[in-house]
């Protein structure tokens, strides 16, 4: 299992070399996306107001403070990704997103998109918002502020990790693998419990 | 309480305490949870779970240093209140004081309000609404203290809640199978390694409540007073950890930090079992208010 330091925007080559179990640290910028802005993009067909080519997007809606016309971070944490599964094909196919950062993994629609366009899912530790907030240097941009806090956010990051490659561009899904191994052990566990 | 002056001030003391407890629970992880995560870190041998647990420990240290919320999800606020039988307390006023304390924590800190109407999805931005915070009352005989336990229950874990009305013929075997299957279904979603609460017996509603009590009110490492239940807790915790779901569902030895069971008698034709899960930051904060209005904070 390899460790990579990648700088955004990510290329297809950057992402295709990543395999499940690898560790990634990101440098550059990441975009905060979430239910409301994804619904506007794909259900109301409004193109994103910022170029997402090669982007790494994180499933978040941060707590922020308005200071001198800009925003300052208060608490930034990651939410459960499965709600956003249906948007990954559009993000990767139409807008060129390369990586989704989230917790607890995604499903078939996202796996297919990652294989087809060269994308990956990077698992961050959920519930560790204090750590995540520390890792984000600054808020560099915000679009669609009317959706606050589910606007589109641009964060500057340095040494942003460890992120674990949990879904890769070959269609491997670590969450599926872990569950498959658990199911394989079930018969033995049942037996020991007298079930 | 014992004196009229304390009696008059009691509700403002409760209000301030309810406010402080909500903020404390979000920032200051209980020592038993810290120890369990540290132990899990030492137990894991593979690279990925070690990295995940090390990040969790780092997040706790940052919360301590910078007084920052550990998780952005401020949850549904739950209060478990034990009222001493010797206290002369106006319960509706006590409940109002807790609601006001919750609102003040949210507005004055400020905290993100995660509480909304179930249909309209409107959010008062106060972490309160009809029937929320949830205030559970319990009464203790021959006692003159008021104990308040505050738990912010996040949605990642609460969404993974399960109830099954088994039939008596399925017996304890059915119960064990349901618990293991529920944990496997929950998988990565509740931010493992988690605390599993199991409710056994009662009616459907009581069974679910017992599971919640087991998941969020008991210190980690505690065992049920009933030796049969305690043995079942140990047996099931070991079984759950054999699944190998691991920290954040990425594989590993530690899927659960604890498994607690609370039970009640049930109907001869029923065999209910419920599972409620608490995420790795098993957040809680406790305070005891004595007869003189003095407040002692703990976990």
Image (cartoon, coloured by chain):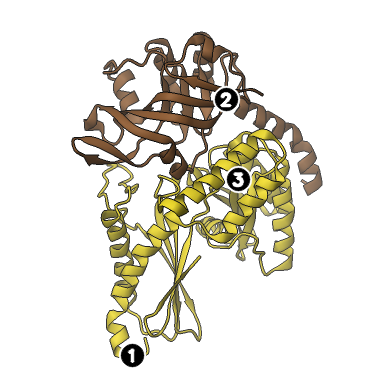
Chain colours: A brown, B yellow
Residue at the image point whose x is 29% and y is 18% from the top: A50
* Left or right, A195 with reference to A123: right
Q: Residue A165 bears which disc, if any?
A: 2
* Viewer-nearest residue: B9 or A134: A134
* Viewer-nearest residue: A137 or B173: A137
In the rendered view, tell whether residue A31 sits above or below residue B213.
Answer: above
Pointer 3 residue = B193
Mark 1 lies on a secondary structure that is loop
Which comes sooner in the sequence, label 1 or label 3?
A: 1
Is the same chain shared between marks 2 and 3?
A: no
Residue at the image point whose x is 63% and y is 58% from the top: B260
Alpha-carbon distance for marks 1 and 2? 62 Å
Mark 3 lies on a secondary structure that is loop
Q: Quadrant of residue A111?
A: top right
In the rendered view, tell whether residue A118 sits above or below residue B7.
Answer: above
Query: Which percent across, then down, holds residue A136?
Result: 40, 34
The label nearer to you, 1 versus 2, is 2
Few, some or many residues within 10 Å of mark 2 (<14, 14–19, 20+): many
Is the same chain shared between marks 1 and 2?
A: no
Q: Quadrant of residue B46?
A: top right
Q: Residue B167 bears which disc, if any?
A: none
Pointer 1 residue = B3
In the rendered view, tell whether residue B10 sits above or below residue A99.
Answer: below
Alpha-carbon distance for marks 2 and 3? 19 Å
In the rendered view, tell whether residue B222 sits above or below residue A173.
Answer: below
Alpha-carbon distance for marks 1 and 3? 47 Å
């Amino acid at each position: 299992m390899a460790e990579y330091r990648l700088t955004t925007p990510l290329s297809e080559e950057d992402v295709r070399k990543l395999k499940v179990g690898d560790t990634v640290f990101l440098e550059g910028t990441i975009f905060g996306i979430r239910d409301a802005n994804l619904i506007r993009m794909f259900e109301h067909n409004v193109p994103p107001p910022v170029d997402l080519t090669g982007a790494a997007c994180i499933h978040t809606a941060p707590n922020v403070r308005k200071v001198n016309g800009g925003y300052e971070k208060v608490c930034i944490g990651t939410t459960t990704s499965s709600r956003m599964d249906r948007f990954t094909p559009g993000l990767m196919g139409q807008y060129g997103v390369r990586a989704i950062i989230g917790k607890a993994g995604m499903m078939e629609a996202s796996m297919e998109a990652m294989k087809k366009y060269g994308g990956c899912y990077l698992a961050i530790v959920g519930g560790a918002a204090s750590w995540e907030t520390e890792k984000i240097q600054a808020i560099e941009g915000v679009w669609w502020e009317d959706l606050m806090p589910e606007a589109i956010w641009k964060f500057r990051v340095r040494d942003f990790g460890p992120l674990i490659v949990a879904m890769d561009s070959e269609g491997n899904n670590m969450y599926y693998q872990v569950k498959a191994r658990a199911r394989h052990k079930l018969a033995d566990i049942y037996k020991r419990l007298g079930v | 309480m014992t004196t009229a002056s304390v009696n008059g001030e009691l509700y403002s003391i409760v209000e301030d305490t309810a406010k402080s407890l909500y903020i404390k629970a979000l920032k200051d992880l209980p020592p038993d949870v810290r120890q369990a995560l540290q132990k899990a870190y030492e137990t894991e041998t593979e690279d990925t779970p070690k990295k995940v647990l090390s990040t969790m420990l780092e997040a706790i240290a940052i919360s301590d240093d910078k007084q920052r919320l550990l998780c952005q999800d401020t949850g549904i606020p739950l209060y478990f209140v034990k009222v001493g039988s010797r206290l002369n307390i106006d319960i509706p006023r006590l409940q109002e004081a807790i609601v006001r304390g919750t609102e003040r924590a949210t507005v004055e800190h400020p905290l993100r309000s995660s509480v909304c109407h179930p249909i309209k999805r409107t959010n008062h931005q106060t972490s309160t609404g009809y029937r929320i915070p949830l205030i559970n009352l319990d009464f203790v005989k021959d006692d003159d203290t008021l104990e308040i336990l505050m738990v912010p229950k996040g949605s990642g874990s609460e969404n993974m809640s399960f109830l099954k009305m088994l039939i008596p013929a399925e017996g304890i075997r059915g119960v064990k199978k349901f618990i293991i299957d529920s944990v496997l279904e929950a998988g990565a979603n509740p931010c493992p390694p988690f605390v599993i609460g199991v409710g056994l017996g009662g009616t459907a509603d009581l069974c679910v409540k017992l599971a919640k009590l087991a998941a969020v009110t008991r210190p980690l490492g505690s065992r049920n007073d009933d030796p049969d239940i305690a043995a079942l807790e140990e047996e099931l915790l070991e079984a759950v950890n054999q699944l190998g779901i691991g920290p954040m569902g990425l594989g590993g030895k530690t899927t659960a930090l604890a498994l607690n069971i609370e039970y009640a008698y049930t109907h001869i034709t029923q065999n209910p079992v419920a599972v409620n899960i608490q995420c790795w930051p098993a957040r809680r904060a406790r305070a005891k208010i004595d007869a003189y209005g003095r407040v002692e904070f703990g976990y």
